[in-house]
Amino acid sequence: MPDRPIIVAGAGVGGLSAALALAAAGRYVIVLERAATLAEYGAGLQLGPNATRRLAKWGALDRLKEFATAPEAVDIRDGRDGSTIATVPVGESEKRWGAVYLLAHRADLLTALSETAARNPNIEVRLGCSLEGWHESIDGVVAHIEGRPDLHGAALIGADGLRSRVREGLSLASPDGPRYSGRTAWRTLLPAAATSAALLRPRTSLCLGAGAHLVLYPLRHGSVLNAVAIVEDEWSDLDAADFWSSHGDAAFLSSRFQGWAREIRDIIANAPEWRRWPLYVRRAVDRWTRGRVTVLGDAAHAMAPFLAQGAAQAIEDADALGLAFSAHPGNEAAALGHYQRARAGRANRVQRASFYQGIVYHLSGPAALARNMAMRALGPSGLARASDWIYRE
């Protein structure tokens, strides 16, 4: 093992992806994770071809495919009557965009990444290690770990999420705290027996309405239905221990979907529980790096989920990081500068587009009618073209 490893803070999707990419570039990586175990958490996610082609590159895609579903299409529906407005043919993803489009549980993605990392002799994951701070030294970075000796590394990568300690130390902007978006995501998994067979087909339903939308798709070979309802909501307590996954009041959620199609109201009512997940974003910045320290994923560009690109952009970050270290062997500062230039513009563009997509989804009245007419006019091929800039990257 080299004297100075690359230190990655956080063993989520971004952190484990970064470890795989850096190991592929020939570096030894130590991943610090505050949790004592890599426990199952979260719910479903959509992984576009810009993500899956990179998972294949690192050897993690085949394992993920054992759990995941490749959908035939995304059906965009009117939430009020359930009718289909338009269809995006993501089943043609490999032909059009060069890689598969997948639906997966976040825990299954983490399993695929962690198992792939565990087989790599250049990756070490240290659980129960909480990063309390860091400082740069003459020839590297010193990570301060709660209750443990300091760890000396050649560089520090902050993949430590929305409330990133690494970003806090970088002081990238002022003010620079997480900002509540004004919306919450309500998530649940319904067993197959509690929903209709039609909703368990390998398709995604995106149901649009005034001030809210609902996303539905099957997971784990159709054994469960993933449902995510996003509504305009109030939230103020970012410091709550379970701010990202508190229990939600189904009666409140039902009130936001009054007047929607019966099938949708039944899903809201039949869910065994709802987890309320406030949606926070971070200010877009062009500078993520200082010296031998940088950030990626939510720590760099936490974004609204309306393009289903949160995990995918973290995976893109990781790939760019590995390529930068390959291009600048032995020069960590140059590699991180290269990474920042490669990624900041692209990630910030996706972040902005995700924000505006949320506005489009939640239109009402004549504006919603105009949106629906435009989607119908584009048709499947036009809607697929509209995603080229994301998925072909």
Image: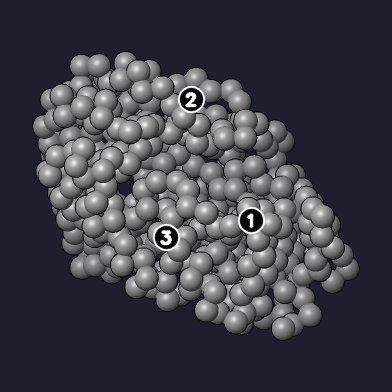
Of pointers 2 and 1, the one earlier in the residue sequence: 1
Residue 348 sits above or below residue 127 on the image: above
Q: Which residue is mark 3?
A: 109
Residue at 67%, 69% (x, y): give it. 30
Neighbourhood count class around disc 2 (C-alpha, 10 Å): few under 14, some 14–19, many 20 upward: some
Q: Are marks 2 and 1 in contact (CB under 8 Å)?
A: no
| Real-space CA distance between mark 2 and mark 1, rounded to the nearest whole angstrom | 32 Å
Q: Amino acid at mark 1?
A: Ala
Please name which of the two marks, 2 or 1, marks the residue nearer to the observer: 1
Please name which of the two marks, 1 or 3, marks the residue nearer to the observer: 1
**Image-based side of 364 in relation to 307, left or right:** left
Instruction: Please tell me in which quadrant of the rendered image residue 28 appears.
Output: bottom right
> Percent from the top left, x then y, of residue 275?
43, 33
Of pointers 1 and 3, the one earlier in the residue sequence: 1
* Disc 3 secondary structure class: helix
Q: Which residue is mark 1?
A: 36
Neighbourhood count class around disc 1 (C-alpha, 10 Å): few under 14, some 14–19, many 20 upward: few
| Real-space CA distance between mark 1 and mark 3, rounded to the nearest whole angstrom | 19 Å
Q: Which residue is mark 2?
A: 182
Residue at 51%, 58% (x, y): give it. 13
Instruction: Please tell me in which quadrant of the rendered image residue 85 appears.
Output: top left
Q: Are marks 1 and 3 in contact (CB under 8 Å)?
A: no
Residue 172 at least partly seen: yes
Give the camera-side residue of 158 and 105.
Answer: 105
Q: Amino acid at mark 3?
A: Leu
Instruction: Please tell me in which quadrant of the rendered image residue 322 appears.
Output: bottom right
Residue 39 sits above or below residue 97 on the image: above
* Disc 1 secondary structure class: loop
* Disc 2 secondary structure class: strand
Residue farthest right in this picture: 138
> Percent from the top left, x then y, of residue 169?
77, 48
Of pointers 3 and 2, the one earlier in the residue sequence: 3
